[in-house]
């Protein structure tokens, strides 16, 4: 089934393809231009062209075609399962494991692993990412929610949309961050100078990140971060923007000799169970590589 999305334009003079690229950061500009060429984008009820200029108040209707038939195969990849019931899994994802298939890694992902564990997840229709209601970067470790049926997926997705799910991350950043408690509110969109990065941009999507300092190991700061919104690379972009990039994050300026990946761990996850309506919360300890990094810092 085709999925439709309608947008109300809040600026003027911008090209249609550029506007969609900024508003829909999860999709590449090339993909959005292809939708326009295929007649799947309309402006004010008329077929659109990629280069046409928009006016404030224009209505843009995008029709997303169904994904191609998935070749997803179950794979017996070890999973650390923190909680499971008939509706969902809470998985402690290791760093280095992609969440879902994509160009460059068509298999050996978390989705392949959960299909092997719970074959019923494959019955969730209309997606190449069955069960996935939120994401972690490939090199981020920690807790993730996975729905096991469509009813649970809808419930959990709505909780995320309504900002009712608690997500807490342990983050190590360069330098001593002050004040010890604060919030970063800055819009995030695709970096106009590097399409592989996100950035704080004036016309990006609203983004809000809260943080609390835990300690100051060496010339670093260990934080608990709780994002209120869920933009792509939000935590990494916000912390880099205030001059304290995440340690080990080469994409946003935090390259470090003590880490082979970014120091980001999803350590706390709270949500309401779709079945009972009860609120539950789970925690995950730092994995060995991040514990070792903190120990190395203390010896510097």
Image: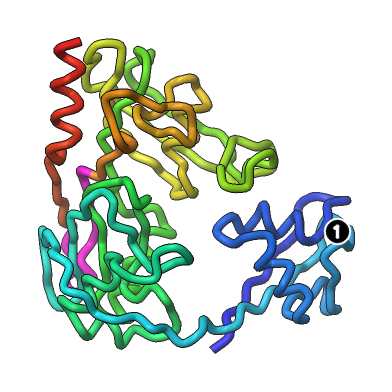
Left or right of 262 on screen, residue 82: left
Q: Which residue is drawn at 51% across and 84% down?
A: 68
Q: Position of residue 97 (x, y in %)?
A: 28, 57
Q: Position of residue 100 (x, y in %)?
A: 36, 66
Q: Where is residue 213 in the image (x, y as percent from the top left)?
A: 28, 21
The one nearer the camera, 116 or 281, is 116
Q: Is residue 275 above or below residue 299?
A: below
Q: Is residue 21 above or below residue 226?
A: below
Q: Is residue 236 above or below residue 59?
A: above
Instruction: Tell me if residue 189 is in the magenta stretch.
Output: no
Q: Callout 1: few (<14), some (14-19), or many (20+) C-alpha neighbours within 10 Å?
A: some
- Secondary structure of the residue carrying numbered label 1: loop
Left or right of 121 on screen, residue 6: right
The one nearer the camera, 158 or 86, is 86
Way the structure is coloured: rainbow
Q: Which residue is drawn at 22% across and 22% down?
A: 214
The one nearer the camera, 1 or 78, is 78
Instruction: Tell me if residue 273 is in the magenta stretch.
Output: yes
Q: Position of residue 57 (x, y in %)?
A: 81, 60
- Residue topped by disc 1: 54
Which quadrant holds the C terminus?
top left
Quadrant of the rendered structure where residue 118 is?
bottom left
Count numbered badges in the picture. Answer: 1
Left or right of 6 on screen, residue 84: left
Q: In this view, does 268 lie above or below 81?
A: above
Q: Residue at x 20, y 66 (%)?
A: 273
Which quadrant holds the N terminus?
bottom right
Quadrant of the rendered structure where residue 110 is?
bottom left
Q: In the rendered structure, which segment of residues is drawn in magenta?
A: 267-279
Q: Residue at x 68, y 38 (%)?
A: 193
């Amino acid at each position: 089934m085709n999925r439709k999305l309608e947008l109300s334009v809040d600026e003027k003079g911008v090209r249609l393809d550029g506007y969609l690229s900024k508003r829909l950061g999860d999709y590449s500009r090339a993909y959005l231009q292809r939708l326009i060429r295929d007649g799947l984008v309309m402006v004010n009820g008329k077929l659109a062209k990629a280069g046409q200029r928009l006016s404030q108040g224009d209505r843009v209707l995008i029709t997303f075609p169904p994904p191609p038939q998935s070749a997803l195969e179950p794979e017996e990849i070890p999973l650390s399962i923190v909680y499971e019931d008939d509706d969902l899994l809470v998985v402690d994802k290791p760093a280095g494991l992609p969440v879902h298939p994509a160009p460059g890694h068509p298999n050996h992902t978390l989705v392949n692993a959960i299909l092997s564990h719970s074959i019923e997840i494959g019955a969730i229709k209309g997606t190449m990412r069955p069960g996935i209601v939120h994401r972690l970067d490939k090199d981020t470790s920690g807790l993730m929610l996975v729905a096991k049926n469509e009813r649970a997926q809808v419930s959990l997705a709505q909780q995320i949309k309504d900002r009712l799910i608690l997500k807490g991350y342990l983050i190590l950043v360069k330098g001593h961050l002050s004040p010890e408690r604060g919030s970063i509110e800055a819009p995030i969109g695709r970096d106009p100078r590097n399409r592989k990065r996100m950035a704080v941009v004036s016309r990006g999507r609203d983004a809000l990140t809260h943080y609390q300092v835990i300690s100051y190991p060496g010339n670093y700061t260990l934080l608990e971060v709780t994002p209120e919104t869920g933009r792509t690379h939000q935590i990494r972009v916000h912390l880099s923007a205030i001059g304290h990039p995440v340690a080990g994050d080469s994409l946003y300026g935090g390259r470090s000799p003590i880490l082979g990946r970014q120091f980001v761990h999803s350590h706390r996850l709270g949500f309401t169970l779709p079945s009972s309506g009860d609120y539950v919360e789970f925690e995950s300890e730092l994995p060995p590589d991040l514990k070792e990094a903190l120990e190395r810092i203390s010896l510097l």
